[in-house]
Image (cartoon, helix red, strand yellow):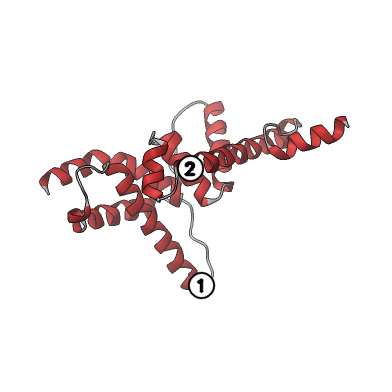
Amino acid sequence: MPDLRNQLLDELPHLKRYAMALSRSHTLSEDMVQDCVVSAIARGHQFRDDMPLRPWLFAILRNNFFTHIRREKQHPLANGETAERDLPTTNGDQETQVELSELQSALDHLSCNHRDLIVKILVEGLSYDEVAQALKVPVGTIRSRLARARINMRLELGRKTYLLEGKPPSGGRNTRRTDVQASS
């Protein structure tokens, strides 16, 4: 158990990033990480040494997040107010701020499952095998879902470019079909 606790400490930054990507709320992400660590310690007997720790923790965190979402739907805020998003700020030049804002906005428009995959694989650096094992699906399913997530992300980023600069979005299935239809 002491070894698991030390490993948990090493995983905290990854858990925090993943929780923030899921919840998009600083306060909620902190609560989610705390709940995840408590659950992991309580379920430490279920963890096997041959399992990678990070996917196991991400599965706990993700399950806790979906439990939170279900509870929110069953018991919305009484006064009808929506919870404020508490996004972190970053230091940098104005161009970097705009790019990060556009990227966050594009991520926000993705489905939770697509956002989840992008964060696990592209941000956290988990392998396809680790994500497939954590989600209990075949690796091919992870590859195809990630491909769709990337297409949707490109389309969303393309829409932002189109709105700001008048350039049409490119890189997705729908735009290819219209290009083919236009050339016919």
Residue 96 image offset from top left, x and y in percent? 52, 28
**Which residue is located at x 43 percent, y 35 percent?**
123
Most extreme residue toward the left is 2
Q: Is residue 6 left or right of residue 51?
A: left
For residue 51, what is the image quadrant? top left
Q: Secondary structure at mark 1?
A: loop
Instruction: Quarter of the image for the C terminus: give it.
Output: top right
Q: Is residue 158 left or right of residue 138?
A: right
Q: Nearer the viewer, residue 76 or 50?
A: 50
Q: Is residue 67 above or below residue 173?
A: below
For marks 2 and 1, give the CA distance.
40 Å
Residue 39 image offset from top left, x and y in percent? 25, 57
Q: Residues within 10 Å of mark 2 (few under 14, many from 20)?
A: some
Q: Secondary structure at mark 2?
A: helix
Q: Nearer the viewer, residue 100 or 47?
A: 47
Identify residue type, mark 2: Ile
In the rendered image, which residue does mark 2 sit on?
Answer: 142
Upstream in the sequence, badge 2 or badge 1?
Answer: 1
The number of numbered discs placed on residues in the rendered structure image is: 2
